[in-house]
Image (cartoon, coloured by chain):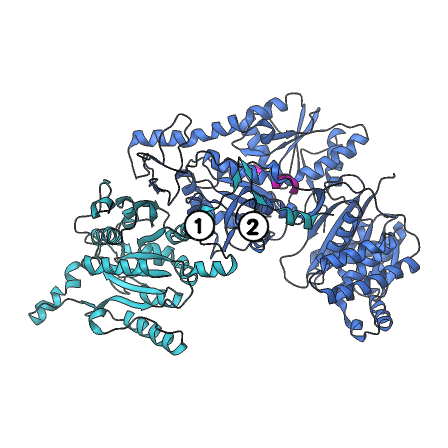
Amino acid sequence: MALKLADYKTEVHNDWCPGCGDFGIVNALQMALAEMGIERDKATIFSGIGCSGKTSHFINTYGVHTLHGRVLTFAQGGKLANPEMTVVAVGGDGDGLGIGAGHFVAAGRRNVDMTYIIFDNGVYGLTKGQASPTLKLGEKTKSLPSPNTNYNVNPIGLAVTSGFTFVARGYSYDVRHLKDLIIKAVRHKGLSFLDVLQPCPTYNDINTRDWYAGVDLAQESMERHSRIYKLDDMQFDPIVHYDDETEVNEKLSQALIKSLEWGNKIPIGVFYQNELISEYSTRLTDKIPNYLENPPAKQKISENGLPTTDVSEILDSLRV
Amino acid sequence: MSAIDFTWLIGGPQGSGVDSGANVFSKVCAEMGYSIFGKREFYSNIKGEHSYFAVRVSNKEIHSNVNDVSLMASFDAETIFRHFNEVPKGGGIIYDSDLDKTYTDEVHTLDNYFKQRLHDELESKNKPFTIAGVLEIAKEKGVNLYPVSFREILTSLAEKTENPKLKGMVRLFNVIAVSLSLGLIKMPLDSLLKSIDSIFSKKPQIAEINKQAANFAYDYAKSKFGNFQYTLTGTTKQPDTILVQGHFGTSIGKMVSGCRFQSYYPITPASDESVYLESHELLEIQNDRPGSTIVIQTEDEISAMGMMIGAALTGTRSSTSTSGPGFALMTEALGWAGINEVPIVITLYQRSGPSTGLPTRHGQDDLLFAVHAGHGDFPKIVYASGDIEESFYDTGRCFNYADVYQIPVIHMMDKFLSSSVVTCKKFDPQKISIDRGMLLDKVEGEYKRFAFTEDGISPRSRLGLDNGVFWNTGDESDEFGHITEDPQVRIKMMDKRMSRLDLVTKRVPNEEQAVSFGVHDYTVISWGSTKGPILDAMFMLKKEGINIGFIQIKLIHPFPSDYVKSLLEDAKTIIDIEANHSGQLGKIFKQNISREIDYFILKYTGRGMTSTEIYDSLKKIVENKANKREVLSHGA
């Protein structure tokens, strides 16, 4: 029986603020799951803590709402033990790039085949609007007592330099484009990262929906002038096509340079993709040939309540 | 057959082969049928600081070290300075005669605190601050000295084998020290050569050189050293004996118990277990395709904990292994596992805290921490093993407890256990059972992960199971696992989870909760690795007609109050023995049983207890000469 979009929605009341950018991301994620036809019981959404952390409760697949900053650790453990599952991890920018930044970098080095989506709004919403890691230096969102004293993290730049093999940015009010990005990210072999710009209507009064739409710029120039533009429209080729140092360096540095673009022009789309880097399960199968056919979650460990693991060779070697 | 009770000590700078020397010696003695109890002490250092290995050998079953060293084999000055006093009258010291004139100040790894104490002693006895000075003290006490020039041995060996390279091979000092010792105690040479072959089985050339050196040194000792009161020529071998290192119990236990995922961050003394699991990651399975353990070295202990929980949610038996500082980082996620009823096993190899503390030394400081780890009220099990053999079977129990009660289990181990090398009865995998509790293989109809049931345990689905969709959250949740802040649901959920504690004390069999080694007027309570030295001390006292009781408490949390209380009904004086400062088990005992501890025997120097020390303290207690707190301090 083919699954419909409605099948991926739960009845849990959604208590996000009206106009929250998070709605667009949840919708896009549900649409992507439906379009890919992934069975509800073959996917797990792992989430962090904060407004975005509630995402897993709104999606009718397995949902694991974890701890602040730790979502990638839970998600990787789940995926490694049961590699047949589709795994998507979600969380805020404070969650993933502040308290969880160490895990972000380490996850890139592993390149486990799963997707990580950051809901990027520049503030800690659920604790009333403190500055988060992506807020720019000197900016003062409305509940900050004084302007932000920290330089911002560059999520795209950090991802490409940490070893993520698919790095993209979406915009929560362009749901169709975001849905397509999610599908690409999930289908990518390796760890994919999606930085989703997501206005917080309650606490971020700088990077608002109108700001992204360029309403202020339009007033100056008397025409419509969105800040957001798509890399797809610019003949930007993010893919590493062959395993060659020059090619890799070119694609990495082009992604890094693009990631620095901000202000009146903000690119969305795929910045970088490299499927030539081994995905973690192939690193495991190099040591454990039948890992994918017989992963931890599928292994039989007992028969009639007795263990079936044969350690006699080890015990014999210890015998005196 | 006369009783053999012989302790051999080898010391040297870290990285000089003290460990492999001790391994050869232990293997030889074990192969010759003796019981072995070996203990390794080392600094938090890679190369240069003093490390030593004391191996006790007996033709009776032994479970501990003693204070006295029967024979010390040294090839550096520091070992002599630090340990000469441990050799009693009639014992022996094999030493490098080239070191005679070495001053304490020339040994830069001798710290000032120790040096000051040593100088005071030498000064009071009118001896120079040299090796010759300390050896004079030993000699006057009646210790036999066996001087030998290690360099001359190498030179003669090089000449004899026509291999000039051997002349400078100081790496052979360890095997020379072992062989001199074995020659002196007249252990058959074949067993030494066989052990070298088996230890260097993958490096035949190195084995050959070592065997040449062994042969030469063995003959040297036999012909030049003269008589020694200890002769160990072998004894009747006990069937099915194995020689194991500290972490083998839990690591092989994990393989057998079906643990298929282990995440960890490197920390002493826990990481040996994970490294061992990874080096044996491919598993043979009866009547099935090969299995495997996925071992992941994570970026920190927080990640190790998160990954383990993620893996456990897929129905995989999952575990981590850590020590105090690492466990401190894991506690937030421990609460997550608690509220989400996730079965996980944390093997906690304790060392001395607080903070980094004595990072490579022993301690049982983390009992109260383990019991109280994590914020909020949630159920967990804290279970303690007393020796390496036990830890194999206990690992099986811990996984069953985790699965059956769907709660985190903290398996208490420690550095004393992890750096012991002992002979014990071969582990029997068929004595481990596997009970996965309410883990589901299929789901039909509507599924609620946290369904309210009569005994508080809900059937458990796993990530990826057909029709078994559920949600988890660290927030309070309803039966589906969705967030709720409803006060009535909160009461029911808290009650459901916490009722697990009563269930554990009710359902876990008594013999798994605590073990009674007899109850007398004076009865010891203790937990963990103090078991071995306590048993040996009891045996020594019994020979003098003093009967001491001993209750080893294994299930520490939830505390089996009723059972322990009933066991101790006839005990008049309760003695708590622990390797920590505050008598942590004593506090738990008093809180649960409302009974005072009469005496504490405590040690927190970072060195394990010897049976001699416990014997001395128990005797003082029985003779009414003891303080309420007896604090032990033996060991370099």
Residues flagged by tags 1 and 2 on a common chain: no
Where residue B396 appears, as percent x and y from the top left, is: 56, 39
**Which amino acid, by three-letter code, is at mark 1?**
Ala
Tell me the quarter of the picture where residue B585 sits. Answer: top right
Secondary structure type for disc 2: strand
Where residue B522 appears, as percent x and y from the top left, is 70, 27
Q: Is residue A133 visible?
A: no
Residue located at (50% from left, 61% from top): A286
Chain that appears blue = B
Please give the chain letter of the residue carrying mark 1.
Answer: A
Q: Which chain is cyan?
A: A
Q: Please rate how many residues cluster around mark 2, counting C-alpha atoms within 10 Å: few if below 14, some from 14 to 19, many from 20.
A: some
The N terminus of chain B appears in which quarter of the rendering?
A: top right
Give yes or no for contact between labels 1 and 2 (Cβ–Cβ under 8 Å). Answer: no
Residue in the foreground of this view, choosing between B285 and B541:
B285
Q: Residue at x 30, y 71 (%)?
A: A238
Point 25% across, 57% down: residue: A121
Q: Is residue A219 above or below residue B20?
A: below
Q: Where are the magenta residues, as a range?
A: B383-392
Q: Residue furthest front?
A: B287
Q: Which residue in the protein does label 1 denote?
A: A81
User: Can you identify the residue that label 2 sits on?
Assistant: B283
